[in-house]
């Protein structure tokens, strides 16, 4: 999520800590609670990587419930 991180950094550097916190809470924090396999799936969906597969030994791929929750989180933060 380079754009939201950059936005938080720029706002914080400009002295607008409140706006930086709002961006953090809305666009970054929701994805910090998800496992690593989900992070790779986000990168795949954003076109950063072409495959979200983990090499062994690795966690199981995310299930359908996790992917539905990811869809909801991405929609909430405007990345879907």
Image (tube, rainbow, N blue to C red):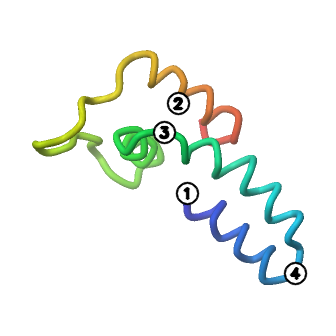
- Asked if the residue at tag 2 contacts the one at tag 3, i.e. Cβ–Cβ closer than 8 Å, the answer is yes
The image position of residue 31, as x and y in percent, is 56, 44
Which residue was labeled with disc 1? Answer: 1
Which residue was labeled with disc 2? Answer: 70
Which residue was labeled with disc 4? Answer: 15
Callout 2: 10 Å neighbours few (<14), some, many (20+)? Answer: many
Which residue was labeled with disc 3? Answer: 34
Between the C-alphas of marks 1 and 2, the distance is: 14 Å
Which of disc 2 and disc 1 is earlier in sequence?
1
Quarter occupied by residue 16: bottom right
Q: Residue at x 20, y 43 (%)?
A: 54
Between the C-alphas of marks 1 and 3, the distance is: 14 Å
Between the C-alphas of marks 3 and 2, the distance is: 8 Å
- Between residue 6 and residue 80, name the one nearer to us: 6
Residue 54, above or below 11: above
The image position of residue 12, as x and y in percent, is 79, 76
In the picture, measured across the screen, residue 42 lies left or right of residue 28, that is left
Residue 15, above or below 64: below
């Amino acid at each position: 999520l380079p754009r939201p991180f950059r936005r938080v950094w720029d706002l914080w550097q400009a002295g607008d800590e409140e706006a930086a916190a709002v961006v953090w809470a809305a666009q970054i924090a929701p994805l910090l609670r998800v496992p690593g396999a989900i992070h790779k799936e986000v990168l795949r969906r954003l076109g950063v990587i072409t495959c979200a597969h983990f090499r062994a030994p690795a966690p199981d791929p995310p299930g359908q419930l996790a992917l539905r929750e990811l869809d909801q989180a991405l929609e909430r933060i405007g990345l879907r």
